[in-house]
Image (cartoon, rainbow, N blue to C red):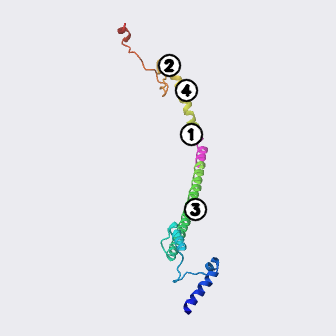
Amino acid sequence: MSSTTATTTTTTTHNNMTDEELDRDWKPNGRRPQSTIARNFSQELMDIFRIDKDITDLDDQVDKRSVSANANAKASATIDIDLDTRKQEVDKKTSELEALEARIREMEEKLKSQYPAAAVGSSAQPSQIHTQTQHVKSRPGTMRQSQQAPGSGAMPPTPIGSEDGDRERGH
């Protein structure tokens, strides 16, 4: 009977405690497993977040992702360095090109100053051509009249009737 009395006393003690006191003191163990509500809630969370593995597997995945993120950051830094190097090369080539253009201009000016007659002779040629053209125009019948080719929108109208007398047949 003593065992029955001890059980009754424990039950009575638990009956006097409030729900908050019972919840605060409760810890899951093999004799009293976690409540079904807590298990269902935990399962819902796992389903919502698609957690199928235990914590250690998830930690490993996070570690792998952080390692790959670091690798991506290093690759990005390498690309930035390559881009900077290429920009420097382009700047260097641009300055070399500008220096060469300046030297070419200097050489052209030297040539013009050394051979001024060549520059004058080249300008005299168009005036000689103009004089010859005027001379040829003064001779009657020796030069064809200048005709300009029609532009794309200035084409002559297409003849409607033929020249062999279509009108005469109609009468």
- Secondary structure of the residue carrying tag 3 is helix
- What's the CA distance linking mark 4 and mark 3? 61 Å
Q: Residue furthest bottom?
A: 2
Q: Is residue 109 magenta?
A: yes
Q: Earlier in the sequence, mark 1 or mark 4?
A: 1
Picture disc at residue 131: 4
SS at circle 1: helix
- Badge 2 vs badge 1, beta-carbon distance below 8 Å: no
Query: Quick check: 20 left or right of 151?
Result: right
Quadrant assignment for the C terminus: top left
Question: Which of 127/49 is in front?
Answer: 49
Percent x, y for residue 134?
54, 23
- On screen, residue 137 above or below 53: above
113 to 52, vertically: above or below: above
Residue type marked 4: Thr
Using the image, determine if residue 24 lies above or below residue 162: below
Mark 3 touches mark 1? (CB < 8 Å): no
Which label sits on residue 84? 3
Give the structural element (helix, strand or loop) at label 4: helix
Q: In this rendering, does residue 136 appear at all? A: yes
* Residue at numbered disc 1: 118
Report the residue marked by disc 2.
Answer: 139
Between the residue at mark 3 and the residue at mark 2, the CA separation in whole angstroms equals 72 Å
Q: Nearer the viewer, residue 6 or 167?
A: 6
Instruction: Say whether marks 1 and 4 touch (CB < 8 Å).
Output: no
